[in-house]
Image: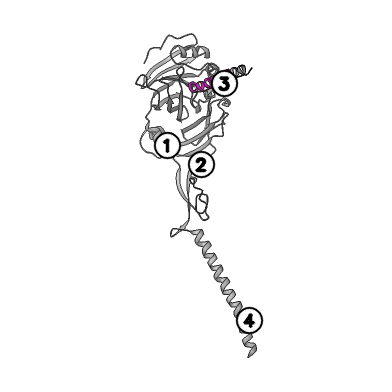
């Protein structure tokens, strides 16, 4: 009986260990099905993650431009990405300097702020921690899909497609090496119903066999649009929380119409573009008001649609201010300490004077009585 129990326990242990290993290996090869601007997937049994995504929307009332920059990491040596657009798009590479200029233009202002009483990190409240602070493929296509353009842009193989059937679109993508997740067919249905078009991008490093890592060359899309829109619906396929950082150039301060299933969007910068040269100045011509928007999506499956942007109620300028708190000092000594010590000294002195005067009065009164 004891031998049987030992054998059963050993078998049970092996089963549990194998199950745990399966779960761990599955999590390692699970693809990242989405980024904030569309669906991004690696090849089979590989992983790719979007460590940082920056996008700019520029709208002049009739035409929209979207510039996207992705910083990726993982072990995938190729990946595919698709973005729906409301009308026929032109695609080209953008100047990476654009996002450097945007970061500088919207950077928070650092200011010093002084406090009188000690706070956490100031003596004597020190805790020891830190203080707060053109390839082939154009033409023939399966029924329901038309390839209107295909081009090679740096590390990108870009195909522009129209489709009347999401299954046919998914089939074309798979046949042509743009491997997409099975759930993509259902996610594409709303765009097919509205007769949107698609920009499918297959990306691979220029050196064969090298994993996709680092910041990719930004892509610049231009298309007609009666209202500024930033496609987000496909991000509902993501398995992990998503973060959106979006710059908007227009005549006025802009804002999303709704949260579309994420946290409340927050404005991190709003104001006129002041740079006079470079890619940001070129894009800002005719649309000089820049709004920077941040938003978190803790539960991507709750994303209910695309971000439609609208004019804010007022062109109120805004810039984040980061305060660096300092304890107020006088000649290197905390002002509160000098005040407390000075107050105590005055109190002691006053008390001593009062005591001396009180002891002298009876003596003076007694001397006068004797006389």
Q: Can you identify the residue that label 1 sits on? A: 103
Q: Position of residue 66 (x, y in %)?
A: 44, 27
- N-terminal of the pair, mark 3 or mark 2, is 3
**Name of the residue lying farthest toward the front:** 2
The answer to whether residue 323 is left or right of residue 360 is left
The answer to whether residue 13 is left or right of residue 69 is right
* Distance CA(mark 3)–CA(mark 2): 64 Å
Q: Residue at x 56, y 72 (%)?
A: 352
Q: Position of residue 242 (x, y in %)?
A: 52, 29
- N-terminal of the pair, mark 3 or mark 1, is 3
- Mark toward the viewer: 4 or 1: 4
Q: Can you identify the residue that label 2 sits on? A: 316
* Distance CA(mark 4)–CA(mark 1): 79 Å
The picture quadrant where one finds residue 216 is top left
The picture quadrant where one finds residue 102 is top left
Q: Can you identify the residue that label 3 sits on? A: 13
Q: Which residues are magenta?
A: 10-36
- N-terminal of the pair, mark 2 or mark 1, is 1
Q: Nearer the viewer, residue 362 or 19?
A: 19
- N-terminal of the pair, mark 4 or mark 1, is 1
- Mark toward the viewer: 3 or 2: 3
Q: Can you identify the residue that label 4 sits on? A: 362
Q: Position of residue 114 (x, y in %)?
A: 48, 53
Position of residue 131 relative to residue 347, above or below, is above
Position of residue 76 relative to residue 254, above or below, is above
Type of secondary structure dominating the magenta stretch: helix
User: Is residue 69 at least partly visible in the picture?
Assistant: no
Q: Are marks 4 and 1 in contact (CB under 8 Å)?
A: no
- N-terminal of the pair, mark 4 or mark 2, is 2
- Mark toward the viewer: 4 or 2: 4
Q: Secondary structure at mark 2?
A: loop
């Amino acid at each position: 009986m004891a031998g049987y129990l030992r054998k059963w326990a050993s078998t049970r242990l092996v089963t549990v260990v194998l199950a745990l290993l399966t779960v761990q290996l599955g999590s390692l090869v699970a693809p990242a099905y989405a980024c904030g601007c569309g669906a991004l997937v690696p090849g089979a049994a590989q992983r790719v993650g979007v460590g940082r995504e920056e996008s700019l929307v520029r709208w002049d009332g009739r035409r929209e431009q979207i510039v996207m920059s992705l910083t990726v990491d993982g072990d995938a040596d190729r990946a595919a990405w698709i973005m729906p657009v409301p009308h026929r798009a032109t695609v080209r590479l953008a100047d990476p300097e654009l996002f450097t200029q945007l970061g500088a233009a919207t950077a928070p202002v650092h200011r010093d702020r002084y406090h009188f009483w000690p706070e956490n990190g100031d003596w004597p409240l020190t805790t020891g921690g830190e203080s707060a602070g053109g390839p082939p493929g154009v033409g023939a296509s399966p029924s329901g899909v038309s390839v209107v353009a295909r081009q090679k842009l740096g590390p990108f193989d870009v195909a522009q497609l129209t489709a009347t059937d999401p299954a046919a679109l998914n089939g074309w993508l798979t046949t042509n090496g743009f491997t997409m997740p099975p759930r993509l067919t259902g996610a594409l249905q709303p765009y097919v119903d509205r007769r949107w078009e698609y920009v499918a991008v297959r990306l691979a490093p220029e050196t064969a066999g090298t994993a996709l890592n680092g910041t990719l060359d930004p892509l610049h899309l231009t298309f007609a649009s009666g209202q500024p829109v930033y496609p987000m619906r496909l991000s509902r396929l993501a398995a992990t929380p998503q973060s959106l950082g979006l710059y908007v150039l227009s005549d006025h301060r802009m804002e999303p119409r709704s949260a579309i299933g994420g946290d409340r969007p927050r404005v991190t910068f709003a104001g006129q573009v002041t740079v006079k040269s470079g890619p940001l100045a070129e894009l800002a011509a005719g649309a000089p008001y820049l709004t920077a928007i941040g938003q978190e999506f803790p539960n991507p499956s709750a994303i209910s649609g695309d971000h439609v942007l609208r004019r804010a109620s007022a062109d109120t300028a805004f810039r984040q201010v980061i305060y660096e708190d300092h304890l107020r000092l006088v000649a290197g000594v905390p002002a509160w300490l000098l005040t407390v010590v000075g107050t105590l000294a005055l109190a002691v002195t006053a008390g001593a004077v009062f005591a001396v005067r009180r002891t002298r009065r009876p003596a003076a009164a007694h001397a006068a009585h004797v006389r």
